[in-house]
Image: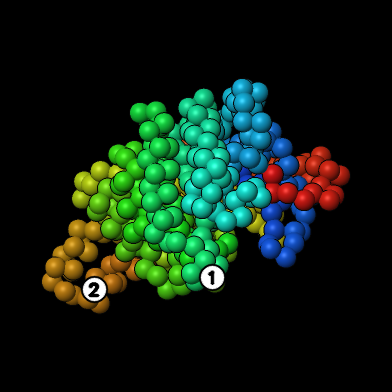
Amino acid sequence: MSLRESAAFDRAVEALDNFRIEIPSWGFANTGTRFGKFVQAAAASTIEEKFADAGEVNRLTGATPTLALHVLWDLPGGGAHDVAQVRLLEKRFNVRAGSINPNLFQDQEYKYGSLCNPSAQVREQALAHVIKSIELGQQLGSRDVSLWLADGSNYPGTQSIRKRIEWLEEALSAAHARLAPEQRLLVEYKPFEPAFYHTDIADWGMATHLASEAGPQARVLVDTGHHYATQNIEQIVAWLLHTGMLGGFHFNDRRYGDDDLTLGSIDPYQVFRIFHEIHSAADDGLEMDIAFMVDQSHNLKGKMEAMVQTVVTAQEIWVKAALVNRKELTGKQTECELVQAEETFRGAFWRDVRPMVSAWREMRNTPADPLAALRESGYVERITRERGSRQVGAASYA
Ligand code: RM4
Ligand code: MN
Ligand code: MN
């Protein structure tokens, strides 16, 4: 039997046809560590270049039709001009504006917090920025506003943790009230950095509480890099699926902190375990509406290569997890046949699905090997030539 005639291939095709992953504009820009930046000649520094790069990734992988935007980096004017420009770029590069990410972390006013700042005036300013982001989402026809706060404190006793919860509840309800019916507010959590004593939205429990209190269109966003080392992320995902609170993901890999390394580069099995929870919940008929997004910035790897590699990895692991024989697995789980259950599960992880994914790519008229196609296209050489001279002295993430 040929590959394309197998039941597994049908399942893989269905899984890949339904899998879309959003890529971030900041993944194409020059970013760095807190020690400095290594500037790349091919990095994008305008919104046009970010859309061009995203369009190329979408052409190569067939899976990235939307681009996440950070309001101050990508839409600094925030007005009609920015919106009109994005609308033109969407058409030109065949990529739509994706989630809108407010910037509540870089202005000097936010030194002691944004929505949780002890100053009512700063809290108001931060809320106004969130509302502006919601309105931008409406103007761009983009559904999700994805909220990450850098708020927290560095030393015990220096802030009232409880007061800050109340301010946050108030702000998120006020923001929720401004959502259009089709919009969603995604609440991201992170237990450390930039604050290192307490973070105001530190984990999925806090994010779930805040999203539930804010209103019916708020959900939790899981960034895989935003957990303590050794935390069982797939269990968190299972709980969020069970409670209907899972709104989306920011995918990246990590070894120590919020490292933003390419997906699956350190622990591909973890990605598999997370994807398995999603396929399994879907098979059981659970309702879900999940925004899959990448949140990575590549400091050493080429940005285009790293992004294509990320999307290809996501597609491959998504298929591996789709191919878990869940009927067999349920039987083994019920019988407590531990080793056999584990082998059924792991067997799918070890399966080489690359021939199937390549066959799907050909069926969908996309290159069989996206990384090779990127190399052959000469795209990176072209943008290196065109952008190189402008990169000297680049200082911001925008
Ligand atoms: C944070 C978080 C957010 C991202 C910012 C820039 O660590 O992951 O999602 O927007 O970084
Ligand atoms: Mn994130
Ligand atoms: Mn992060």
| Circle 1 residue | 155
* Closer to us: 292 or 158: 158
Tell which quarter ligand 3 is in: bottom right
Residue 397 drawn above or below residue 48: below
At x 42% / y 49%, what residue is drawn? 167
Label 2: how many Cα within 10 Å (few below 14, some 14–19, many 20+):
some
**The disc label shown at residue 244, or none:** none
Left or right, 14 with respect to 309, comes to: left
Q: CA distance from mark 2 to mark 1?
A: 49 Å
Instruction: Identify residue type, mark 1.
Output: Tyr
Q: Is residue 154 visible?
A: yes
The mark tally for this picture is 2
Q: Position of residue 390 (x, y in %)?
A: 83, 43
Q: Is residue 220 visible?
A: no
| Circle 2 residue | 340
Left or right, 361 with respect to 52, comes to: left
Label 1: how many Cα within 10 Å (few below 14, some 14–19, many 20+):
few
At x 40% / y 70%, what residue is drawn? 231
Residue 9 drawn above or below residue 131: below
Q: Position of residue 173 (x, y in %)?
A: 37, 40
At x 28% / y 52%, what residue is drawn? 241
* Closer to us: 110 or 360: 110
Left or right, 338 with respect to 45, comes to: left
Q: Position of residue 61 (x, y in %)?
A: 54, 43
At x 51% / y 53%, what residue is drawn? 118
Number of the front mark, 2 or 1: 1
- For numbered disc 2, what is the local secondary structure? helix
Quadrant, the C terminus = top right
Instruction: Identify residue type, mark 2.
Output: Gln
